[in-house]
Amino acid sequence: MLTAITAHITTNKIGRKDLLFPLGLLDHAAAAASAAADASSAEIDLGLTEPNAAGRVYRHGTLTAYSMGPCRCEQCRNAYAVYRAARRAAGKDNTRTSRSAGDPAGHIPRSWFRHHIWQPTLQAADLPLKVRPHDLRHAHASWLLAGGADLQVVKERLGHGTITTTEQYLHTLGGADDTALSALLSIRRSSRDV
């Protein structure tokens, strides 16, 4: 095998930064593999899959058997792998790039945040209660409303779609009636001064 690769490099004058197998060769190889898979599954009856939840069965070695079956036998996996390779070679499916914590897009994976930020912070604070990040969001909204912030402002700040979602945070305000009366009195006083 090594001698065959060495001969290929020498024959095609491939340098250190060149592709060992150009994309044209890969496209032909993928097409040949696809044709071979189609021919082999057409020649050999692989049978039918087990019935799925809806009671339907599919022919082994097909995309339908892999996706709808869902069958994970070697023939069905190979059919799906050839299909995906052909799509990637045609540029239809771009592979996702992995993200890191320092990603300029600003995305921090939930598990990374939980393990590297949240849990060490809770341990350093030595809190007796289990505190979730959502608890901080709830406290933030409740404190804003207790401080007299407008309900619409809090709605926009939390990104709620409707004001009724934000109204759920009003139940935590013990002195809400007193705050409302104080606001009414301050408005009445300011209108008398004018």
Image (tube, grey):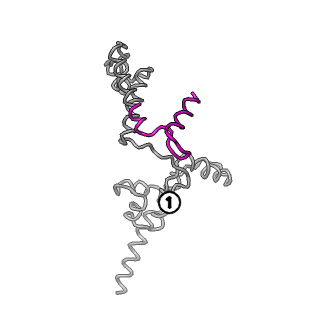
Residue segment shown in magenta? 1-29
Spot occupied by residue 17 in the image (x, y as percentages of width and height): 53, 47
Q: Which residue is mark 1?
A: 140
Task: Say whether residue 120 is left or right of residue 72.
Answer: right
Residues 85 and 80: in front is 85
Task: Say whether residue 105 is left or right of residue 28.
Answer: right
Q: Quadrant of residue 68?
A: top left
Task: Say whether residue 102 is left or right of residue 74.
Answer: right
**Amino acid type, residue under disc 1 in the picture:** His
Q: Residue at x 51, y 36 (%)?
A: 11
Magenta stretch, main secondary structure class = helix
Q: Residue at x 40, y 66 (%)?
A: 150
Spot occupied by residue 23 in the image (x, y as percentages of width and height): 42, 39
Q: Residue at x 35, y 25 (%)?
A: 35
Position of the C terminus by quadrant: bottom left
Other residues around mark 1 within 10 Å, as few (<14) / some (14–19) / many (≥20)? some
